[in-house]
Image (cartoon, rainbow, N blue to C red):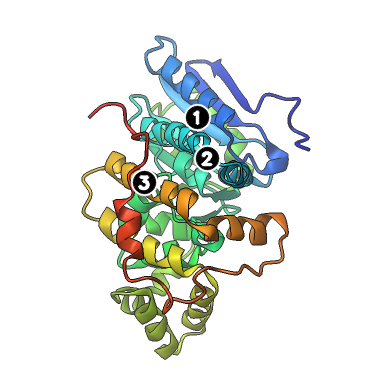
Amino acid sequence: MDTDAAEPRVLARCEHRLGHLTLNRPRAINALDLGMVHDLDAALVAWADAPDIDLVLLDGAGERGFCAGGDVRGLAEQIRAGQAEAASIFFRAEYALNARIAEYPLPLVAIADGVTMGGGIGLAGHAAIRVVTERSRLAMPETRIGFTPDVGGTWLLARAPGRVGEYLALTGASMTAADAIYAGFADHLVPSERIPALRDALETRADPSSPTELVLLFDETADASALEAARPWIDEAFSADTVGEIIARLRERAEPAASLAADTLTEVSPTALAVTLEAVRRARSLPNLRAALAQEYGLVLWFAATQPDLLEGIRAQLVDKDRSPTWNPATLDALGADTVAQAFAFAPATPLWDEP
């Protein structure tokens, strides 16, 4: 039972020319459902041309995190029930929201305090001004449930320095605030104890008045990024052509973190790994976020319609929590030679964008 159900799951209010949106499912770490996506989108549409709103703030309720992602348990139930159209409806609404945030005409400040994963990246990662704290942990962990990064995650991953994007996408590794800033997922580090003061400053708009200048009043220099320090072995290993070659290169490295990354890749869905590697690399040549979202849309519906690993991954990680998924196929060697091509050739019944 969702004990947050009695309260609105999105709080939307206007204060002194500030439109303030708060994800309000703290017991579920503000995980997104379709109703929340619709509520967020409706508020942004209403405020875009509102004469009394010139700045938007997006944050999450509770101490645990901004947003743990989308409702993948609900997705699993839809797949089991043969409700492919319901899954399509959710993804179309979510991706339209991601694009709206990225293209929003007003400055939009997102505070990704605490856990920010999957769908949470789709909200905060595309905002104009992205704030993290010392408590922030950002990740795109989809391969661990037999899935692939979406919500525009491949667009961000493809633009991370060197081969950091491949590393984060395939392993699902968690980023600290410093890592997120280095990888291009965030802009500013503000200590969590100063977040209430930042919210107040954005509302009252004391001098200096621009949102970026206000955030900089509270910004602190992040510690050194572990991702940046790991670039030599990450770039060398994750530049390989295939997942199998990446694992082989990782096994040849002396760094303990490289060995741990190799161990992770041997435990993750082979199908998800192969498709995700190609998705990040193709995203590097796409013209914009909308094109990346369209690519992701086809891939996620291919997983939902055809791949048993998605249901198995959700079962193992989130339902039974035995952390022992049985992947099909079980190894990279057993993966069909045309699997990746099939994934990218999949044509959803309903297109993502209504316009050409």
* Residue at the image position 61 percent from the left and 53 percent from the top: 135
Mark number for residue 111?
A: 2
Q: Residue at x 46, y 26 (%)?
A: 56
- For disc 3, the neighbor class at 10 Å (few under 14, some 14 to 19, many from 20) is many
Q: Amino acid at mark 2?
A: Ile
Q: Residues within 10 Å of mark 1 (few under 14, many from 20)?
A: many
Farthest top residue?
51
Q: Residue at x 65, y 32 (%)?
A: 24
Q: Nearer the viewer, residue 23 or 114?
A: 23
* SS category of the residue bearing label 3: helix
How far across and down, in percent of the image, does residue 53 sit? 44, 16
- What is the three-letter code of the residue carrying label 1? Leu
Residue 60 vertical position relative to residue 209 in the rendered view, above or below:
below
Q: Position of residue 13 (x, y in %)?
A: 57, 18
Q: Are marks 2 and 1 in contact (CB under 8 Å)?
A: yes
Query: Sequence order check: which comes first, mark 3 or mark 1?
Result: 1
Q: Kindly identify which numbered label has been placed on residue 298.
A: 3
Residue 165 visible in this rendered orientation of the protein: no
Alpha carbons under labels 2 and 1: distance apart:
8 Å
Kindly tell me whether residue 136 is visible in this rendering: yes
Q: Within 10 angstroms of label 2, few (less than 14), some, or many (20 or more) residues?
A: many
Q: Amino acid at mark 3?
A: Gly
Badges 3 and 2: C-beta atoms under 8 Å apart?
no
